[in-house]
Image: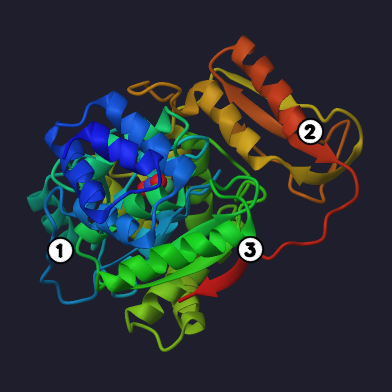
Amino acid sequence: MDSRAVIESVRDGRASPEGMAWFARGLASGKVTDAQAGAFAMAVLLKGVPEDCRVALTRAMRDSGDVLTWDLPGPVVDKHSTGGVGDSISLLLAPALACCGAYVPMVSGRGLGHTGGTLDKLEAIPGYNVDVSEPRLRALMRETRCAIVSASNRIAPADKRLYAIRDVTGTVESLDLITASILSKKLAAGLQVLVLDVKQGSGAFLPGVDQARALARSLVDTANGAGCRTSALITDMDRPLALTAGNALEVAEVMDTLTLRAPSARLLDLTCALSGEVLFLAKLAPSAEAGAAKIRAAIEDGSAAERFGQMVAAQGGPADFVERYANLLPEAPVIREVPAPGPGIVAAIDTRAVGTAVVHLGGGRLAGGDAVDPRVGFSALAEPGASVGPGAPLAMVHAASEAAAEAAIATLQQAYRLGEAPAPVALVQERVA
Ligand code: URA
Protein backbone atom coordinates (compact mmCIF):
# COMPACT_ATOMS: atom_id res chain seq x y z
CA MET A 1 0.00 0.00 0.00
CA ASP A 2 1.16 3.59 -0.56
CA SER A 3 -0.24 7.09 -0.01
CA ARG A 4 -1.13 7.71 -3.65
CA ALA A 5 -3.06 4.45 -3.90
CA VAL A 6 -5.08 5.26 -0.76
CA ILE A 7 -5.87 8.79 -1.98
CA GLU A 8 -6.96 7.45 -5.38
CA SER A 9 -9.16 4.81 -3.75
CA VAL A 10 -10.98 7.48 -1.71
CA ARG A 11 -11.23 9.79 -4.73
CA ASP A 12 -12.78 7.01 -6.82
CA GLY A 13 -15.24 5.85 -4.13
CA ARG A 14 -13.44 2.55 -3.39
CA ALA A 15 -11.99 3.37 0.06
CA SER A 16 -11.17 0.39 2.27
CA PRO A 17 -10.82 0.14 6.08
CA GLU A 18 -7.26 -1.16 5.58
CA GLY A 19 -6.35 1.85 3.44
CA MET A 20 -7.75 4.30 5.97
CA ALA A 21 -5.84 2.64 8.82
CA TRP A 22 -2.65 2.59 6.74
CA PHE A 23 -3.01 6.33 6.05
CA ALA A 24 -3.51 7.15 9.75
CA ARG A 25 -0.34 5.26 10.62
CA GLY A 26 1.48 7.03 7.80
CA LEU A 27 0.41 10.43 9.18
CA ALA A 28 1.96 9.58 12.52
CA SER A 29 5.14 7.98 11.15
CA GLY A 30 5.82 10.74 8.61
CA LYS A 31 5.52 8.38 5.62
CA VAL A 32 2.65 10.58 4.35
CA THR A 33 3.68 14.06 3.16
CA ASP A 34 1.72 17.29 3.93
CA ALA A 35 0.61 17.48 0.29
CA GLN A 36 -0.68 13.91 0.41
CA ALA A 37 -2.47 14.58 3.71
CA GLY A 38 -4.18 17.65 2.18
CA ALA A 39 -5.23 15.65 -0.90
CA PHE A 40 -6.51 12.79 1.28
CA ALA A 41 -8.55 15.20 3.41
CA MET A 42 -10.05 16.83 0.30
CA ALA A 43 -10.91 13.43 -1.22
CA VAL A 44 -12.64 12.32 2.02
CA LEU A 45 -14.49 15.63 2.25
CA LEU A 46 -15.74 15.51 -1.35
CA LYS A 47 -16.54 11.79 -1.62
CA GLY A 48 -17.30 10.67 1.95
CA VAL A 49 -16.39 7.17 3.08
CA PRO A 50 -18.53 4.25 4.31
CA GLU A 51 -19.03 3.72 8.03
CA ASP A 52 -16.51 0.86 8.34
CA CYS A 53 -13.84 3.14 6.84
CA ARG A 54 -14.74 5.96 9.22
CA VAL A 55 -14.47 3.59 12.20
CA ALA A 56 -11.15 2.19 10.91
CA LEU A 57 -9.75 5.72 10.50
CA THR A 58 -10.91 6.72 13.99
CA ARG A 59 -9.42 3.64 15.66
CA ALA A 60 -6.12 3.84 13.79
CA MET A 61 -5.80 7.55 14.63
CA ARG A 62 -6.52 6.75 18.29
CA ASP A 63 -3.91 3.98 18.21
CA SER A 64 -1.32 6.15 16.45
CA GLY A 65 -0.05 7.13 19.92
CA ASP A 66 -0.50 6.19 23.57
CA VAL A 67 -3.94 5.22 24.85
CA LEU A 68 -4.22 6.25 28.51
CA THR A 69 -5.74 4.10 31.23
CA TRP A 70 -6.70 5.46 34.65
CA ASP A 71 -6.98 4.11 38.15
CA LEU A 72 -8.85 6.90 39.93
CA PRO A 73 -11.53 6.73 42.64
CA GLY A 74 -14.17 8.33 40.38
CA PRO A 75 -15.32 8.34 36.75
CA VAL A 76 -13.10 9.83 34.06
CA VAL A 77 -15.27 12.05 31.88
CA ASP A 78 -15.22 14.76 29.25
CA LYS A 79 -17.28 16.71 26.72
CA HIS A 80 -16.30 17.90 23.28
CA SER A 81 -17.87 20.38 20.92
CA THR A 82 -17.93 20.03 17.15
CA GLY A 83 -16.82 23.66 16.97
CA GLY A 84 -18.50 27.03 17.28
CA VAL A 85 -18.08 30.78 17.63
CA GLY A 86 -17.78 32.19 21.16
CA ASP A 87 -17.97 28.66 22.53
CA SER A 88 -16.04 28.78 25.80
CA ILE A 89 -18.09 26.11 27.59
CA SER A 90 -15.10 23.83 28.34
CA LEU A 91 -13.63 26.46 30.65
CA LEU A 92 -16.70 26.41 32.88
CA LEU A 93 -17.56 22.75 32.52
CA ALA A 94 -14.21 21.13 33.47
CA PRO A 95 -13.94 22.75 36.92
CA ALA A 96 -17.68 22.41 37.61
CA LEU A 97 -17.59 18.66 36.88
CA ALA A 98 -14.47 18.29 39.04
CA CYS A 99 -16.47 19.83 41.93
CA CYS A 100 -19.17 17.16 41.46
CA GLY A 101 -17.08 14.00 41.83
CA ALA A 102 -15.75 13.52 38.28
CA TYR A 103 -12.18 13.52 36.92
CA VAL A 104 -11.71 15.59 33.76
CA PRO A 105 -8.44 15.15 31.80
CA MET A 106 -9.62 17.32 28.91
CA VAL A 107 -7.53 17.02 25.75
CA SER A 108 -8.55 20.03 23.66
CA GLY A 109 -7.77 21.58 20.30
CA ARG A 110 -6.78 24.90 18.81
CA GLY A 111 -8.90 27.08 16.57
CA LEU A 112 -10.07 25.28 13.45
CA GLY A 113 -11.37 27.12 10.39
CA HIS A 114 -13.69 29.92 11.56
CA THR A 115 -14.14 28.43 15.05
CA GLY A 116 -12.19 29.23 18.20
CA GLY A 117 -10.09 26.67 20.09
CA THR A 118 -10.08 26.04 23.83
CA LEU A 119 -6.26 25.96 23.95
CA ASP A 120 -5.95 29.34 22.22
CA LYS A 121 -8.41 30.79 24.74
CA LEU A 122 -6.50 29.43 27.74
CA GLU A 123 -3.21 30.70 26.35
CA ALA A 124 -4.65 34.22 26.71
CA ILE A 125 -4.01 33.67 30.45
CA PRO A 126 -0.40 34.72 31.12
CA GLY A 127 1.75 31.67 31.90
CA TYR A 128 -0.96 29.03 31.27
CA ASN A 129 0.80 25.99 29.86
CA VAL A 130 -1.22 23.55 27.76
CA ASP A 131 1.74 21.27 27.01
CA VAL A 132 1.72 18.87 29.89
CA SER A 133 3.52 15.53 30.11
CA GLU A 134 1.56 12.39 30.90
CA PRO A 135 3.02 12.05 34.45
CA ARG A 136 2.12 15.68 35.12
CA LEU A 137 -1.42 15.12 33.78
CA ARG A 138 -1.76 12.20 36.19
CA ALA A 139 -0.53 14.39 39.06
CA LEU A 140 -3.02 17.11 38.06
CA MET A 141 -5.88 14.61 38.25
CA ARG A 142 -4.94 13.96 41.88
CA GLU A 143 -4.38 17.65 42.70
CA THR A 144 -7.27 19.43 40.99
CA ARG A 145 -9.29 16.65 39.28
CA CYS A 146 -9.39 18.71 36.08
CA ALA A 147 -6.87 19.86 33.50
CA ILE A 148 -7.22 21.27 30.01
CA VAL A 149 -4.23 20.30 27.89
CA SER A 150 -3.14 19.83 24.30
CA ALA A 151 -2.76 16.38 22.82
CA SER A 152 0.92 15.66 23.44
CA ASN A 153 2.87 14.20 20.55
CA ARG A 154 2.07 10.86 22.13
CA ILE A 155 -1.74 11.24 22.12
CA ALA A 156 -3.32 10.71 18.69
CA PRO A 157 -0.35 12.20 16.78
CA ALA A 158 -2.10 11.36 13.51
CA ASP A 159 -4.91 13.78 14.44
CA LYS A 160 -2.49 16.46 15.57
CA ARG A 161 -0.95 16.48 12.09
CA LEU A 162 -4.14 16.15 10.07
CA TYR A 163 -5.97 18.77 12.21
CA ALA A 164 -3.35 21.44 11.43
CA ILE A 165 -3.45 20.57 7.72
CA ARG A 166 -7.28 20.61 7.56
CA ASP A 167 -7.32 24.00 9.28
CA VAL A 168 -5.51 25.63 6.34
CA THR A 169 -6.75 23.57 3.38
CA GLY A 170 -10.53 24.10 3.52
CA THR A 171 -11.09 20.48 4.52
CA VAL A 172 -12.71 20.77 7.93
CA GLU A 173 -16.35 20.32 6.92
CA SER A 174 -16.44 16.54 6.66
CA LEU A 175 -18.55 14.29 8.88
CA ASP A 176 -15.96 11.49 8.50
CA LEU A 177 -12.97 13.67 9.38
CA ILE A 178 -14.71 15.45 12.27
CA THR A 179 -15.73 12.09 13.76
CA ALA A 180 -12.23 10.64 13.47
CA SER A 181 -10.58 13.82 14.74
CA ILE A 182 -12.73 14.28 17.83
CA LEU A 183 -12.96 10.66 18.84
CA SER A 184 -9.34 9.67 18.19
CA LYS A 185 -8.07 12.07 20.85
CA LYS A 186 -11.00 11.63 23.22
CA LEU A 187 -10.80 7.82 23.14
CA ALA A 188 -7.00 7.98 23.55
CA ALA A 189 -7.57 9.93 26.78
CA GLY A 190 -9.09 6.76 28.29
CA LEU A 191 -12.52 8.26 29.05
CA GLN A 192 -15.38 6.31 30.59
CA VAL A 193 -18.00 8.94 29.69
CA LEU A 194 -18.16 11.49 26.88
CA VAL A 195 -20.87 14.02 26.00
CA LEU A 196 -20.74 15.71 22.61
CA ASP A 197 -22.00 19.18 21.87
CA VAL A 198 -22.99 18.96 18.21
CA LYS A 199 -23.58 22.43 16.83
CA GLN A 200 -26.25 23.29 14.31
CA GLY A 201 -26.79 26.58 12.49
CA SER A 202 -24.82 29.17 10.52
CA GLY A 203 -21.71 28.94 12.74
CA ALA A 204 -21.44 25.14 12.67
CA PHE A 205 -19.13 23.26 10.32
CA LEU A 206 -22.14 21.21 9.19
CA PRO A 207 -24.94 23.81 9.50
CA GLY A 208 -28.06 21.80 8.55
CA VAL A 209 -30.09 20.04 11.21
CA ASP A 210 -29.98 16.77 9.26
CA GLN A 211 -26.20 17.04 9.00
CA ALA A 212 -25.99 17.71 12.75
CA ARG A 213 -28.16 14.64 13.45
CA ALA A 214 -26.00 12.48 11.17
CA LEU A 215 -22.80 13.75 12.83
CA ALA A 216 -24.24 13.18 16.31
CA ARG A 217 -25.26 9.63 15.34
CA SER A 218 -21.82 8.91 13.85
CA LEU A 219 -20.02 10.22 16.95
CA VAL A 220 -22.30 8.49 19.47
CA ASP A 221 -22.26 5.10 17.71
CA THR A 222 -18.52 5.11 17.08
CA ALA A 223 -17.68 6.11 20.68
CA ASN A 224 -20.14 3.68 22.29
CA GLY A 225 -18.80 0.96 19.97
CA ALA A 226 -15.32 1.68 21.33
CA GLY A 227 -16.54 1.20 24.92
CA CYS A 228 -17.04 4.83 26.04
CA ARG A 229 -20.56 5.71 27.35
CA THR A 230 -21.51 8.59 25.06
CA SER A 231 -24.46 10.79 24.17
CA ALA A 232 -24.81 14.05 22.26
CA LEU A 233 -26.84 17.24 22.54
CA ILE A 234 -27.59 19.16 19.35
CA THR A 235 -27.31 22.84 20.24
CA ASP A 236 -27.88 26.21 18.60
CA MET A 237 -25.00 27.81 16.70
CA ASP A 238 -27.12 30.07 14.53
CA ARG A 239 -25.66 32.95 16.52
CA PRO A 240 -22.47 33.33 18.55
CA LEU A 241 -22.96 31.36 21.74
CA ALA A 242 -22.82 34.36 24.09
CA LEU A 243 -21.73 38.00 23.85
CA THR A 244 -18.03 37.73 22.96
CA ALA A 245 -15.86 36.08 20.29
CA GLY A 246 -12.08 36.20 20.64
CA ASN A 247 -9.68 34.53 23.02
CA ALA A 248 -9.07 36.89 25.97
CA LEU A 249 -12.56 38.38 25.61
CA GLU A 250 -14.15 34.95 25.98
CA VAL A 251 -12.00 34.13 29.02
CA ALA A 252 -13.20 37.37 30.63
CA GLU A 253 -16.83 36.42 29.89
CA VAL A 254 -16.24 32.99 31.45
CA MET A 255 -14.76 34.62 34.55
CA ASP A 256 -17.63 37.12 34.78
CA THR A 257 -19.94 34.09 34.76
CA LEU A 258 -18.00 31.83 37.14
CA THR A 259 -17.57 34.64 39.66
CA LEU A 260 -21.22 35.72 39.14
CA ARG A 261 -20.08 39.31 38.55
CA ALA A 262 -22.00 39.44 35.26
CA PRO A 263 -23.13 35.90 34.49
CA SER A 264 -24.05 34.96 30.94
CA ALA A 265 -27.34 33.02 31.08
CA ARG A 266 -26.51 31.14 27.87
CA LEU A 267 -23.05 30.06 29.06
CA LEU A 268 -24.56 28.92 32.35
CA ASP A 269 -27.48 27.09 30.74
CA LEU A 270 -25.38 25.19 28.22
CA THR A 271 -22.73 24.32 30.80
CA CYS A 272 -25.43 22.92 33.08
CA ALA A 273 -27.15 20.97 30.29
CA LEU A 274 -23.95 19.33 29.01
CA SER A 275 -22.45 18.67 32.44
CA GLY A 276 -25.77 17.37 33.77
CA GLU A 277 -25.75 14.83 30.95
CA VAL A 278 -22.15 13.87 31.86
CA LEU A 279 -23.04 13.38 35.55
CA PHE A 280 -26.02 11.23 34.55
CA LEU A 281 -23.99 8.99 32.21
CA ALA A 282 -21.28 8.76 34.89
CA LYS A 283 -23.88 7.66 37.45
CA LEU A 284 -23.08 10.68 39.62
CA ALA A 285 -26.68 11.94 39.28
CA PRO A 286 -30.00 10.09 38.90
CA SER A 287 -31.01 12.16 35.85
CA ALA A 288 -29.53 14.79 33.56
CA GLU A 289 -31.79 17.41 35.20
CA ALA A 290 -30.52 16.48 38.68
CA GLY A 291 -26.96 16.63 37.33
CA ALA A 292 -27.59 20.08 35.88
CA ALA A 293 -28.87 21.28 39.26
CA LYS A 294 -25.68 20.01 40.97
CA ILE A 295 -23.53 21.87 38.45
CA ARG A 296 -25.52 25.09 38.84
CA ALA A 297 -25.07 24.84 42.61
CA ALA A 298 -21.28 24.35 42.21
CA ILE A 299 -21.11 27.49 40.10
CA GLU A 300 -23.42 29.55 42.31
CA ASP A 301 -21.60 28.72 45.54
CA GLY A 302 -18.25 29.76 44.03
CA SER A 303 -16.61 26.31 44.12
CA ALA A 304 -16.29 26.05 40.33
CA ALA A 305 -14.54 29.46 40.21
CA GLU A 306 -12.18 28.36 42.98
CA ARG A 307 -11.44 25.10 41.12
CA PHE A 308 -10.81 27.04 37.90
CA GLY A 309 -8.28 29.16 39.79
CA GLN A 310 -6.55 26.04 41.11
CA MET A 311 -6.38 24.58 37.59
CA VAL A 312 -4.89 27.80 36.19
CA ALA A 313 -2.25 27.95 38.95
CA ALA A 314 -1.42 24.24 38.58
CA GLN A 315 -0.84 24.76 34.84
CA GLY A 316 1.50 27.71 35.30
CA GLY A 317 -0.89 30.69 35.38
CA PRO A 318 -1.16 33.37 38.07
CA ALA A 319 -2.23 32.12 41.51
CA ASP A 320 -4.61 35.09 41.87
CA PHE A 321 -6.21 34.86 38.42
CA VAL A 322 -9.78 34.57 39.70
CA GLU A 323 -9.43 37.73 41.77
CA ARG A 324 -7.47 39.77 39.21
CA TYR A 325 -8.47 38.45 35.76
CA ALA A 326 -9.64 41.86 34.57
CA ASN A 327 -6.11 43.24 35.10
CA LEU A 328 -4.25 40.14 33.94
CA LEU A 329 -5.89 39.48 30.57
CA PRO A 330 -4.26 41.30 27.63
CA GLU A 331 -6.20 44.17 26.02
CA ALA A 332 -6.24 45.29 22.38
CA PRO A 333 -4.85 48.78 21.63
CA VAL A 334 -7.86 49.72 19.45
CA ILE A 335 -11.41 49.30 20.80
CA ARG A 336 -14.22 50.77 18.69
CA GLU A 337 -17.97 50.57 18.26
CA VAL A 338 -19.36 48.64 15.29
CA PRO A 339 -22.24 50.94 14.28
CA ALA A 340 -25.43 49.37 12.94
CA PRO A 341 -26.01 50.30 9.28
CA GLY A 342 -29.33 51.87 10.36
CA PRO A 343 -31.96 51.55 13.07
CA GLY A 344 -33.64 48.14 13.24
CA ILE A 345 -34.00 44.76 14.89
CA VAL A 346 -31.41 41.98 14.57
CA ALA A 347 -33.18 39.35 12.44
CA ALA A 348 -30.29 36.94 11.74
CA ILE A 349 -26.53 36.61 12.14
CA ASP A 350 -24.13 34.89 9.73
CA THR A 351 -22.18 33.32 12.57
CA ARG A 352 -19.49 31.82 10.35
CA ALA A 353 -18.73 35.35 9.07
CA VAL A 354 -18.35 36.56 12.68
CA GLY A 355 -15.86 33.74 13.37
CA THR A 356 -14.00 34.43 10.15
CA ALA A 357 -13.75 38.12 11.10
CA VAL A 358 -12.10 37.10 14.39
CA VAL A 359 -9.60 34.96 12.45
CA HIS A 360 -8.81 37.92 10.14
CA LEU A 361 -8.33 40.20 13.16
CA GLY A 362 -5.54 37.77 14.17
CA GLY A 363 -7.53 35.71 16.69
CA GLY A 364 -7.10 32.53 14.58
CA ARG A 365 -4.78 31.17 11.90
CA LEU A 366 -4.82 31.73 8.14
CA ALA A 367 -1.69 29.61 7.60
CA GLY A 368 -0.21 26.76 9.61
CA GLY A 369 2.06 27.99 12.42
CA ASP A 370 0.59 31.56 12.47
CA ALA A 371 0.76 33.17 15.92
CA VAL A 372 -2.62 34.00 17.47
CA ASP A 373 -3.30 37.45 18.93
CA PRO A 374 -5.21 36.80 22.18
CA ARG A 375 -6.41 40.41 22.51
CA VAL A 376 -8.64 40.73 19.46
CA GLY A 377 -12.28 39.94 18.68
CA PHE A 378 -15.73 41.29 19.45
CA SER A 379 -17.55 42.00 22.70
CA ALA A 380 -21.12 43.07 23.43
CA LEU A 381 -22.37 41.30 20.29
CA ALA A 382 -26.01 42.30 19.71
CA GLU A 383 -28.31 39.30 20.06
CA PRO A 384 -31.11 38.22 17.71
CA GLY A 385 -34.17 40.36 18.45
CA ALA A 386 -32.10 43.26 19.86
CA SER A 387 -32.82 46.82 18.73
CA VAL A 388 -29.78 48.45 17.16
CA GLY A 389 -29.13 51.87 15.68
CA PRO A 390 -27.77 55.21 16.91
CA GLY A 391 -26.35 54.65 20.41
CA ALA A 392 -26.95 50.86 20.15
CA PRO A 393 -24.06 49.37 18.13
CA LEU A 394 -23.82 45.84 16.75
CA ALA A 395 -20.77 45.15 18.93
CA MET A 396 -17.43 46.50 20.09
CA VAL A 397 -14.42 45.48 17.99
CA HIS A 398 -11.04 44.88 19.67
CA ALA A 399 -8.21 45.13 17.14
CA ALA A 400 -4.43 45.40 16.86
CA SER A 401 -4.67 48.41 14.50
CA GLU A 402 -7.14 50.95 13.10
CA ALA A 403 -6.97 49.27 9.68
CA ALA A 404 -7.83 45.87 11.15
CA ALA A 405 -10.71 47.42 13.10
CA GLU A 406 -12.10 49.06 9.92
CA ALA A 407 -12.05 45.77 8.01
CA ALA A 408 -13.72 43.91 10.88
CA ILE A 409 -16.43 46.59 11.18
CA ALA A 410 -17.30 46.19 7.50
CA THR A 411 -17.44 42.39 7.82
CA LEU A 412 -19.60 42.45 10.94
CA GLN A 413 -22.03 44.91 9.37
CA GLN A 414 -22.46 42.42 6.51
CA ALA A 415 -22.85 39.49 8.92
CA TYR A 416 -25.84 41.08 10.66
CA ARG A 417 -29.23 41.17 8.90
CA LEU A 418 -31.81 43.61 10.23
CA GLY A 419 -35.54 42.98 9.80
CA GLU A 420 -38.36 41.22 11.65
CA ALA A 421 -37.65 39.95 15.17
CA PRO A 422 -36.89 36.22 14.79
CA ALA A 423 -38.79 33.46 16.63
CA PRO A 424 -36.88 32.31 19.72
CA VAL A 425 -34.61 29.30 19.11
CA ALA A 426 -33.99 26.67 21.82
CA LEU A 427 -30.36 26.52 22.95
CA VAL A 428 -30.52 22.73 23.42
CA GLN A 429 -32.52 21.20 20.60
CA GLU A 430 -32.22 17.40 20.73
CA ARG A 431 -30.55 14.58 22.63
CA VAL A 432 -28.98 11.72 20.68
CA ALA A 433 -28.08 8.58 22.62
N1 URA B 1 -13.08 19.44 16.98
C1 URA B 1 -12.07 18.57 16.69
O1 URA B 1 -11.30 18.20 17.57
N2 URA B 1 -11.93 18.16 15.44
C2 URA B 1 -12.75 18.54 14.44
O2 URA B 1 -12.58 18.10 13.33
C3 URA B 1 -13.81 19.44 14.74
C4 URA B 1 -13.95 19.88 16.03
Residue at the extreme left of the image, as rendered: 135
Q: How is the rendered protein coloured?
A: rainbow
Mark carried by residue 259 = none
What SS does tag 1 mark? helix
Nearer to us of marks 3 and 1 is 3
What SS does tag 3 mark? loop
Mark carried by residue 427 = 3
Estimate the x, y position of residue 10 in percent, counting from the top left.
36, 43
Residue neighbourhood size for the residue with mark 2, other residues' Cα within 10 Å, grouped as few (<14), some (14–19), many (≥20): many
Q: How far apart are the alpha carbons under marks 3 and 1?
A: 34 Å
Quadrant housing the C terminus: bottom left
User: Which residue position holds label 2?
Assistant: 393
Quadrant housing the N terminus: top left
Q: Amino acid at mark 3?
A: Leu
Estimate the x, y position of residue 35 in percent, counting from the top left.
30, 24
Determine contact: label 2, label 1, CB under 8 Å. no
Estimate the x, y position of residue 34 in percent, counting from the top left.
27, 26
Q: Residue at x 13, y 48 (%)?
A: 65
Residue 147 visible within the image: no
Q: Amino acid at mark 2?
A: Pro
Q: Amino acid at mark 1?
A: Arg
Asked if ligand 1 lies within 8 A of label 1, the reply is no
Q: Residue at x 13, y 67 (%)?
A: 70
User: Which residue position holds label 1?
Assistant: 142
